[in-house]
Image (cartoon, grey):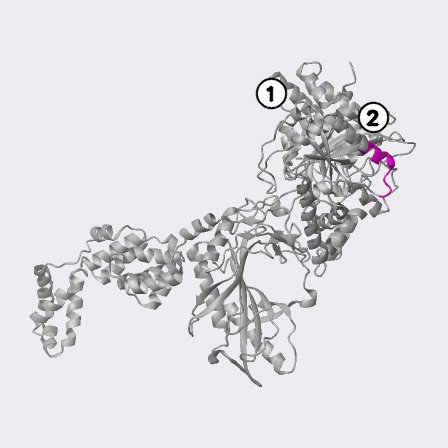
Amino acid sequence: MFIAPRVADKKDWLSGDTGDWELIIGLEVHAQVASKSKLFSGASTEFGAEPNTQVALVDAGLPGMLPVVNEFCVEQAVRTGLGLNAQINKFSRFDRKNYFYVDLPQGYQISQFEFPVVGEGEIEITPEDGEAVMVGIERLHLEQDAGKSIHDLSPDETYVDLNRSGVALMEIVSKPDMRSAAEASAYVDALRQIVRALGTCDGDMEKGNLRADVNVSVRRPGGELGTRCEIKNVNSLRFIRQAIHYEARRHIEILEAGGTIDQETRLFDNVKGETRTMRSKEDAHDYRYFPDPDLLPLELTDEFIANIKADLPELPDARKARFVEQYGIPAYDAGVLTADKAKGDYFEIVAGGRDAKIASNWMMGELFGALNTAELDLDDSPISAESLGGLLDRIADKTISGKIAKDVFAKMFAGEGTADVIIERDGLKQVTDMGAIEGYVDEVIAANPDQAEKAKENPKLLGFFVGQVMKKSQGKANPQAVNQLLRAKLGL
Amino acid sequence: MTDLTKLTLAGALGGMASGEFSSVELTDAHIDACEAASGLNAFITPTFDLAREQAKASDDRRVKGEVGRLEGAPLGMKDLFCTEDVKTTAASKILGDFKPPYESSVSANMKADGMVMLGKLNLDQFAMGSANETSCFGPVINPWRNDEDLVPGGSSGGSAAAVAADLCLGATATDTGGSIRQPAGFTGTVGIKPTYGRCSRYGIVAFASSLDQAGPIAKTVEDAAILLESMAGYDPKDSTSLNEPVPDWRAACGQSVKGLRVGVPREYTMDGMPKEIEKLWAEGVEWMRDAGAEIVDVSLPHTKYALPVYYVVAPAEASSNLARYDGMRYGMRVEGENLADTYERTRTEGFGDEVRRRIMIGTYVLSAGYYDAYYLRAQKVRTKIAADFRNAWETCDVLLTPTAPSAAFPVGRKINDPVQMYLNDVFTVTANLAGLPGISVPAALDGNGLPLGLQLIGKALDESTVFKAAGALEKAAGFTAKPSKWWS
């Protein structure tokens, strides 16, 4: 069914007792659509609500209740498809995937089986330790999430929370194009950045709104494909790498001992760092897919697709390249600042008409540090991009020194006002009046005659005098002017 | 005062409009009739107190000049329609004492039009059956009898029996393969299944979603038109609902059929079908000709595949639609040793034999390895059946056929022979598979004194022509027979 022509870089080969092995990885990523309501009902999708408070009648599978597709979710799927450079299918259809479980109230999940809304595409990824590679997208389809079974509230009962039941997911299926754990995690990271830039998914793996099923097999480099195992629901980049490492070693050990791999579905235990059997191929469900007769096929017009296309934001890769080009900042900075849309937007405001490297340094240093400490997202930053720009302007026009600026920043972060307000209120304006600075210099030299004498032989003492003068000026004296005057007066 | 239960719906609405009687009087008369007819077992849940309240409220509205389309009319509701705070069973055990916190769109439309609801009517369990014998509340007895108890047809047997016995002025019903038209035929009543998508399916317990359609069973063609005008209409809560205006069907009933092209499909006959039915069909053709219609011979060559196609598609959808009855959230639950065991016990005890049979057939035809041979092939043939009709519409405007291949049969006669039972739907399933409107009009009594119906099938969304032709047929047939009131 699949072909996997690319052979991994030699550095990614895994060595076994009988020779080298190559990893073949494909991923199915479930990305929750950033939609206020569910795929087929008006119930809210907000995270963290009390159990069973966001459940429409259809989400609970009540008799006679019918699904009605949420057009916004369809739009987001198409948007994502365009972001993945993929084919948009003008005809697609919802199918029922039938199975019984307590958290599946209808007894079936509405998904897209035969005709997904998005077809083949591809994206470029750059693993941390290697070169850029292209990863093919097989398809993207829309489906509803199930509810949540909670097994640990009672020793002999299972509780069910249907808040998630019916939430819209995009299942993004890759081709088996990844050859290392680093590539797999770079792929998920790239997807995450794309959906965040598009605004179609929050991409928050901790909240579970982006999670991956990882298909792993090994083969001799360039050889016949091996049997794959699917590791379900891995929810962090680190776990994805760990699960792949573990699974690859497991396969190699079995194969080298003369065994065969059973095709099965496995679970990743993130405490032990191991995978274990969930169900074998023999236990696999027969899902009895068939077209959902409650829903009409999705038929998209060229106009609908064109409108979404026209409204597509710049994607992370393109934006990163533009940042390097347009702002002359290092590729590393550009990567960090384009990791999500908010950061890039913030940067462009701060850097607009200013020294972009300084803007980038302030964001990545002071701002991200302070936000991190305060456990805030950029969206909730107490300092707006305009305000940070205002602060940088005061450094640029020498109203304050870089050092004072850090204090001003802290006060801005504490909500005390704009840079100008704080500088004015606290009298932090840099002293550039040579007369006043000369006064401080004379006072300091007069108060330290011995040191002044010694400085003639030991110019390192200049630092001491600079410090004293700055202290006297409460940090406001222009450092260059202080230096210049001290050198002259001390005869250095 | 004359017996108010003998009135047609049109007559009763007129009588209330002219102040001859109130809704309370009309409703009380019908409640008395219902109480006297408990032996027919037409109701699962009577709602007489609610009906009296609604009648009172209706009379109050009338004083204020607020008069809806069904103002004050006591009607019956097939117990497949979810009704807010009123027990809804689908004639099953598995729904237990389920009281929906919501109202089906069809019943909501009728409420808004001033309906008085007498109660929830018996039916085949989950609408699966052709004799109303699969109900877990016992069979409905046909008001028409012939020495022994006869079935009223199904699945809308309670609706048909209640209307035929003058227990209500009309009733809602649903039709997946003939469940409105065949019982109408068996009870001397009029039943119309409109175009798929005319009536919202929202809040109707689903049997086979691509075939299910609501419609009325009534005493006359005109009454059926009045009821359907209230029931039908676009509903954004049902994605398969058609966004089309509801025409004045009542007006269509009296229109002339002069020049109307009536097609007679030669395939609508069956081995072993009583000669009387053939004869009645030929008579119907003559009545239409005499009324000015042009008669056209047509062929619908895929008709013979309709029943097998239906018995693949309908169970397939049902097997999935009924998966939600798992004992977890509502209805009955039989505790087992573990989850799978609880599912098994609940569904084994909660569903009757026929429902379990169809779930198993449906599961089978959707299974890996069988899907292509059964479900997919059935869907392909279904498109050919629809194409047959499209071809027919090139030479005719409406089709005339028998409603069912027999008259009502004795209770218990076919219940253990599913294939014999399924043959009841042979002339009606085609309209469901093609989504077309079909009506059954009572045409004559057979040699045993039992009613026989004729069916008219029309083009999609062309109920107006169907009502026009049905009106002419009704007039020509002059069917006025009523069952003797043996039950009270």
Please check the rendered image and state whether residue B273 is part of the magenta-colored stretch, yes or no: yes
Classify residue A401 as left or right of residue A382: left
Query: Which picture quadrant has residue A287?
Result: bottom right
Residue lying at the far right in this picture: please name it.
B147
In the image, B57 versus B113, the foreground residue is: B113
Classify residue B165 as left or right of residue B102: right
| Quarter containing the N terminus of chain A | bottom right
Query: Which picture quadrant has residue A126?
Result: bottom left
In the image, residue A359 sits, relative to residue B460, either above or below, namely: below
Q: Which residues are drawn in magenta?
A: B271-281
- Whole-angstrom CA distance, mark 2 to mark 1, is 33 Å
Chain label for disc 1: B
Query: Which picture quadrant has residue B187?
Result: top right
The amino acid on which the numbered mark 2 sits, given as a three-letter code, is Ala
**Circle 2 residues within 10 Å: few <14, some 14–19, many ≥20:** few
In the image, residue B121 sits, relative to residue B14, either above or below, namely: below
| Image position, residue A52 (x, y; %) | 59, 48
Classify residue A164 as left or right of residue B117: left
In the image, residue A82 sits, relative to residue B436, either above or below, namely: below
Residue at image mark 1: B66
**Residue B365 visible to the viewer:** yes
In the image, A290 versus B91, the foreground residue is: A290
Mark 2 or mark 1: which comes first in sequence?
2
| Image position, residue B257 (x, y; %) | 69, 27
Residue at image mark 2: B36
